[in-house]
């Protein structure tokens, strides 16, 4: 709409220019020389043709010709031309203005095509969409106002078409037509017509031609580009084909690189997991085995025996936690978690979480802050207690012996908030974006602590299962803070009556 209004404004301004030139020569300068007037009109037409669409320049050309005939070519005041030389001058004027308008329109259209080609090239080379080939087709259709675009790539059984726009299937080329375009010359093939080198037209219906171009990578062909909806110059089609071929090759390389990166990361994760599991299994097994062996020593006192029993129990508890983590990770991966909602006081959930990791917490001072009062919440207490237990275990693992770990709960809008704070070294800023990634432990953790990196991932999974969320940050006074939120109904005992 804005483009049409701008063109209409240019047309009115050009018509006013014709009227101004005519009035200037006839009324003010009293000049009726046809040559001077014709050159002035021609200059105006050239200016208009250089800045306006073809229809505007042709309109100005026609008006200029009529004004030249009526006001300057004898007999003046009529549209009759009696002199042969005047007819020749009039015809030359019309021809020059029309040709100039046409050439200017072609030059402007080519400049516009080049600008669109440049914009499309830039978009094609930075495209990183999840369906990148289809997004590439949409960019092409949008930039060149095409009704239909398809990037057709062979898939072993035919072609996979990444399409943009719509076109009746009756007018689309079949897989055999695409194969003929990709395989080589198709002159004389039914339905396919050579339009230019490496450009062919599929004509199932004369009103809906489809241009087909092979996408080349050196001497080999990687696919076929199909476009329909408006006629483009052969040079523009060839340029588009080259850009699309480069973009397709780039996207394939990106896919290969991503697959290679995924494979490399998978190997690294498996290696790290096996190494961590081997360490985490060996340590408690060794402790428990040694403690049990020591119990066979008859010289041990009752206190020493109790100590060995405690060491064995701690090792077995650690093994139990490790296998529980593995089972919980498997359940999260398979979506095998069903919510069991119950009305419980938040303090009861915190107490259950502490009981799960009481051996790990013995070397620390644990402070509980309950801000829920006498309110109760409706949620799955087992899942929440498990998540909080993992946070407590993580805090104990990364905090100095004898330091304080604080657990606080509070009823907030929409549910329950639980915060676990420690006095450890905090979280490295580089680790914060990845702290909940599977098996991620950070550079310092790999050097200083054992563990598989599953605990925080399990916390995130348990929160997602309850439509909750978890967040990690560093405290201003030092240490880390983990906050979880679980949506839940809230009520007080008074609400029951």
Image (cartoon, helix red, strand yellow):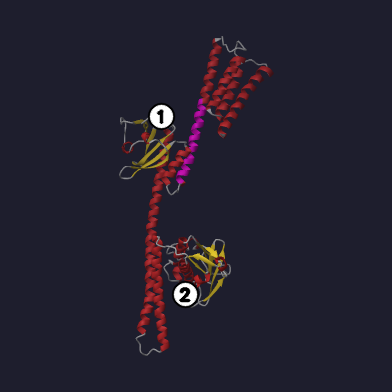
Q: Quadrant of residue 247?
A: top left
Q: Is residue 107 magenta?
A: yes
Residue 483 falls left or right of residue 321: right
Q: Position of residue 453 (x, y in %)?
A: 43, 66
Image quadrant holding the N terminus, namely top right
Q: Position of residue 34 (x, y in %)?
A: 60, 16
Pointer 2: residues within 10 angstroms few (<14), some, or many (20+)? Answer: some
Camera-nearest residue between 20 and 392: 392
Residue depicted at x 37% and y 79% = 288
141 over 332 or under it: above or below: above
Q: Position of residue 170 (x, y in %)?
A: 36, 34
Q: Quadrant of residue 203?
A: top left
Stretch of the chain drawn in magenta: 102-125
Contact flag, marks 2 and 1 (Cβ < 8 Å): no
Camera-nearest residue between 372 and 423: 372
Camera-nearest residue between 483 and 37: 483
172 over 19 or under it: above or below: below
Q: What kind of secondary structure does the magenta stretch mostly adopt?
A: helix
199 over 306 or under it: above or below: above
Residue depicted at x 47% and y 44% = 123
Image quadrant holding the C terminus, namely bottom right
First in residue order: circle 2 vs circle 1: 1
Residue depicted at x 42% and y 84% = 307
Dot 1 falls on a residue whose secondary structure is: loop
Label annotation for residue 303 = none
Q: How many marks?
A: 2
Residue position for label 2: 355
Extreme residue in the top direction? 82
Q: Position of residue 480 (x, y in %)?
A: 53, 68
Residue position for label 1: 207
Camera-nearest label, 2 or 1: 2
């Amino acid at each position: 709409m804005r483009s049409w209004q701008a063109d209409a404004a240019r047309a009115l301004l050009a018509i006013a220019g014709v009227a101004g030139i005519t009035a200037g020569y006839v009324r003010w300068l009293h000049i009726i020389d046809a040559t001077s007037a014709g050159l002035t009109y021609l200059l105006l037409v050239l200016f208009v043709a250089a800045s306006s669409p073809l229809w505007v320049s042709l309109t100005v050309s026609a008006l200029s010709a009529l004004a030249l005939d009526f006001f300057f070519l004898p007999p003046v005041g009529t549209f009759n031309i009696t002199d042969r030389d005047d007819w020749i001058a009039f015809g030359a004027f019309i021809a020059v203005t029309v040709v100039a308008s046409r050439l200017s329109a072609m030059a402007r259209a080519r400049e516009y095509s080049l600008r669109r080609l440049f914009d499309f090239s830039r978009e094609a080379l930075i495209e990183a969409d999840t369906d990148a080939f289809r997004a590439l087709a949409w960019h092409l259709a949008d930039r060149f106002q095409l009704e239909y675009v398809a990037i057709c790539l062979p898939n072993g059984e035919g072609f996979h078409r990444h399409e943009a726009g719509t076109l009746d299937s009756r007018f689309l080329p079949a897989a055999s037509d695409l194969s003929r375009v990709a395989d080589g010359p198709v002159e004389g093939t039914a339905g396919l017509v050579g339009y230019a080198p490496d450009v062919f037209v599929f004509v199932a219906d004369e009103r809906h031609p489809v241009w087909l171009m092979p996408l080349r990578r050196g001497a080999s062909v990687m696919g076929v580009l199909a476009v329909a909806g408006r006629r483009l110059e052969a040079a523009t089609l060839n340029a588009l084909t080259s850009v699309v071929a480069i973009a397709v090759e780039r996207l394939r390389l990106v896919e290969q690189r991503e697959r290679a990166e995924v494979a490399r990361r998978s190997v690294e994760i498996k290696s790290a997991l096996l190494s961590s599991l081997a360490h985490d299994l060996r340590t408690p097994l060794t402790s428990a085995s040694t403690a049990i062996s020591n119990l066979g020593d008859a010289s041990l006192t009752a206190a020493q025996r109790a100590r060995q029993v405690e060491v064995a129990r701690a090792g077995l508890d650690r093994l139990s936690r490790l296998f529980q983590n593995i089972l919980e990770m498997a359940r999260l991966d398979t979506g095998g978690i069903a919510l069991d909602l119950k009305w419980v006081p938040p303090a009861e959930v915190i107490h259950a979480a502490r009981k799960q990791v009481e051996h790990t917490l013995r070397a620390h001072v644990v402070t509980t802050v309950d801000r829920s009062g006498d309110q109760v919440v409706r949620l799955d207490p087992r899942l929440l207690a498990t998540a909080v237990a993992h946070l407590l275990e993580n805090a104990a693992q990364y905090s100095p012996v004898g330091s304080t770990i604080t657990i606080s709960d509070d009823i907030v809008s929409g549910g329950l908030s639980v915060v676990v704070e420690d006095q450890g070294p905090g979280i490295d800023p580089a680790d914060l974006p990845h702290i909940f990634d599977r098996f991620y432990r950070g550079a310092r953790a790999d050097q200083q602590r054992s563990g598989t990196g599953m605990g925080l991932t399990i916390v995130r999974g348990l929160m997602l299962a309850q439509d909750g969320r978890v967040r990690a940050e560093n405290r201003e006074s030092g240490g880390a803070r983990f906050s979880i939120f679980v949506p839940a109904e809230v009520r007080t005992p008074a609400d029951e009556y």
